[in-house]
Amino acid sequence: MFAHLHGIEARQTGEIPLISGAWIAGVSGVDLFFVISGFIMVWVAGETPPSVRNAGTFLFARVMRIYPLWWLFAGAMAVYLLLTYGQPWDAQKIAAVNVGGVEHMVKSFLLIPHDAFPILPLGWTLIHEMYFYVVFALLLLLPQSFRIRAMIIWTLLILAGISAQLTGFYADNLISLILFPMTLEFLMGAGVAWMIKAGWTQWRWPALALGLFGFGWAFYAVNFRDTTALLAIARTFSYGPAFALIVYACVAFEVERGIGRFVPASLVYLGDWSYSLYLCHLLVISALARIFFLMFAQEGYVDNAIFIGLAIMASIGVAGLTYRFFEQPVISASRTARKSWFAPRS
């Protein structure tokens, strides 16, 4: 959120923004997201007995977790573009990569990789997330003893793709998606979960120290303004290991010391709202900026400070409301449907 707030503030005011350019590194939150996703998949389903029903139950739960909220905000973005430009897509951007409007809409809403970023650009991460889930569901068809081996083979396949330079800045087709470097972050998180499940929690302090050092190094070394394939590789091998070590350390401390009891409830709520916040903040900040700076823009930084405060509160507020009145009901309905549709037949 702060990374995008920096860019919008700079673009709208033409001044040196109050939000430091260092916050561009905030987009590394995606790398943390991928590591946590891999961890959670193994933590909740890694020991699920192999069966088509269990794999289907897992994939149904993941589809219902990702798509409804994505459709809500991708649809909101389409309406925003329609009201702003007269078309529910950015015609200039998709024309630049020779993609038709209808094709762009369909593939965006279904999270299918193509030459253009999804209609709500943040959705590129969800394309990878759904790919993770599909492959992991296939792994659940394998005996438990083969799953770690399958992940090692998956890792080697991606490393081979990196060596052969088969992917670019963005996964714009199925082959590029399969071999994309950032998938390694998902596998790093999965590896952390297997380690914790095996009881290997004794390295939490050195892991935390190395992880924080690695994050600091990546913060200064990785340039997120790069638009080449090197960015995906650089962030994977810089932020990925750092976040994997930090996640390992935090979970190990929770297992051994129960540090979760010290986390304020407000941060737990914010964590619950994080998916809604991720998808809504760019829309909320952009819409607010259009209105605010049209009405109140002036020289100096008073207006900037007011805008930043309003943008943060509005983004978090919309996320909280979305979670309460949309995301939670969808999750509840999904659980009910899953129990009904995937229950064992007598």
Image: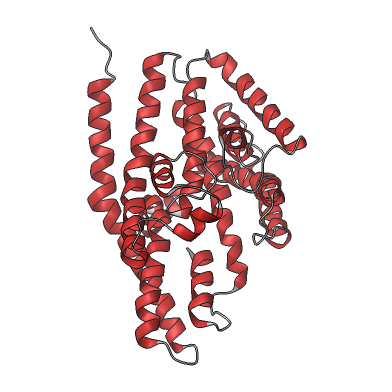
Q: Nearer the viewer, residue 146 or 172?
A: 172
- Residue 159 lies left or right of residue 119; in this view the side is right
Across and down, in percent, residue 13 comes to 50, 82
Give the vertical position of 313 relative to 147 (above or below).
Answer: below
Across and down, in percent, residue 244 comes to 62, 43
Give the vertical position of 295 relative to 179 (above or below).
Answer: below
Q: Quadrant of residue 339?
A: top left
Q: Residue at x 36, y 39 (%)?
A: 65
Which quarter of the rendered picture does the C terminus lie within? top left
Q: Nearer the viewer, residue 11 or 208?
A: 11
Question: In this view of the protein, can residue 310 be seen by the observer?
Answer: no
- Residue 245 lies left or right of residue 89; in this view the side is right
Across and down, in percent, residue 187 comes to 60, 34
Q: Residue at x 55, y 55 (%)?
A: 96
- Residue at the farthest right position: 163
Q: Residue at x 37, y 87 (%)?
A: 296
Q: Residue at x 39, y 72 (%)?
A: 311
Q: Nearer the viewer, residue 310 or 36?
A: 310
Q: Nearer the viewer, residue 192 or 152?
A: 152
Across and down, in percent, residue 310 comes to 37, 75
